[in-house]
Image (cartoon, rainbow, N blue to C red):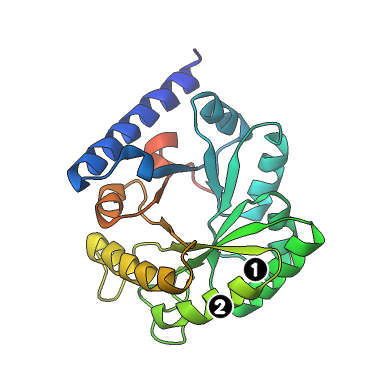
Amino acid sequence: MTDRKAQLAANLAQVEERIVSSCAAAGRKREEVTLIVVTKTYPASDVRILHELGVRHVAENRDQDAAPKATACADLSLTWHFVGQLQTNKVRSVTSYADVVQSVDRAKLVTALSAAAVRGERELGCLIQVALDAESGERGERGGVAPDGVEELAAAIGEAPGLRLDGLMTVAPLAGEYADRQRAAFDRLMEISSRLRAGHPAANMVSAGMSGDLEDAVAAGATHVRVGTAVLGVRPRLG
């Protein structure tokens, strides 16, 4: 085993232990939580090692990094998640490799994703990114739609050809009433998810929690956690 593979295997084991413990504490089954490894800034070689170690879900937040990486790993059975703020001029590229876009936050993006998915003869999973720091009608500092805009966006995705409404995503806010209150933020997301599922029963995916707060996300009921640093190490500075 190479040094890098041994390092990633050890890190994955630690993250797995955290998820198992969190599920046990919350009275949940381990299989209720899917680990997504955020591979941004790391090379395709790391993605290949992660696949060897059993990882099947990976995430990226920049198309210019993700597109060549996805091409280099096209022979692997992976589900690719796009988690960054997405500009409409990048949509055609992103829909060529992403299976799920977790950062849908405006009607214009829904229209662009739908057109690209239909053109590419693909069905694209969509998560609405909820900004818990945004006022009504605004977007959050890190992207996302205000909670009162979720239902309208869900209806647009539900009616859009080529798109599938899978659920919700959030990033714990740095400001506002939920700053430094990750558990409260994730509980609020679960409330919004419950309302969404009343009209869209299949939209049961809840993506929340990262390296520092995955326990809070699991305790709240998240179905997917997005972990980067705890698996891959501290990210190199981008030039």
In this rendering, position of residue 16 left or right of residue 67: left
| Outermost residue to the top | 1
Question: Mark 2: which secondary structure?
Answer: helix
Residue in the picture at 65% in, 64% down: 163
Query: Mark 2 and 1 residues: CB-CB less than 8 Å, in contact?
Result: no
The vertical placement of 137 against 13, above or below, is below
Q: Quadrant of residue 204?
A: bottom left
In this rendering, position of residue 125 left or right of residue 215: right
Tell me, for residue 155, which label it has, or none. 2
- For badge 1, the amino acid type reads Gln
Q: Nearer the viewer, residue 233 or 138?
A: 138
Disc 2 versus disc 1: distance between alpha carbons? 21 Å
Location of residue 69 in the rendering, given as x and y in whole percent from the top left corner: 66, 40
Circle nearer the N terminus (2, 1): 1
Q: Nearer the viewer, residue 49 or 77?
A: 77
Tell me, for residue 218, which label it has, or none. none
Judge whether residue 168 can be spotted in this image.
yes
Location of residue 35 in the rendering, given as x and y in whole percent from the top left corner: 42, 42
In this rendering, position of residue 9 left or right of residue 183: right
Question: Looking at the image, is mark 2 or mark 1 nearer the viewer?
Answer: 2
- For badge 2, the amino acid type reads Ala
Judge whether residue 173 can be spotted in this image.
no
The vertical placement of 15 against 153, above or below, is above
Residue wearing tag 1: 87
The vertical placement of 185 against 106, above or below, is above
| Outermost residue to the left | 25
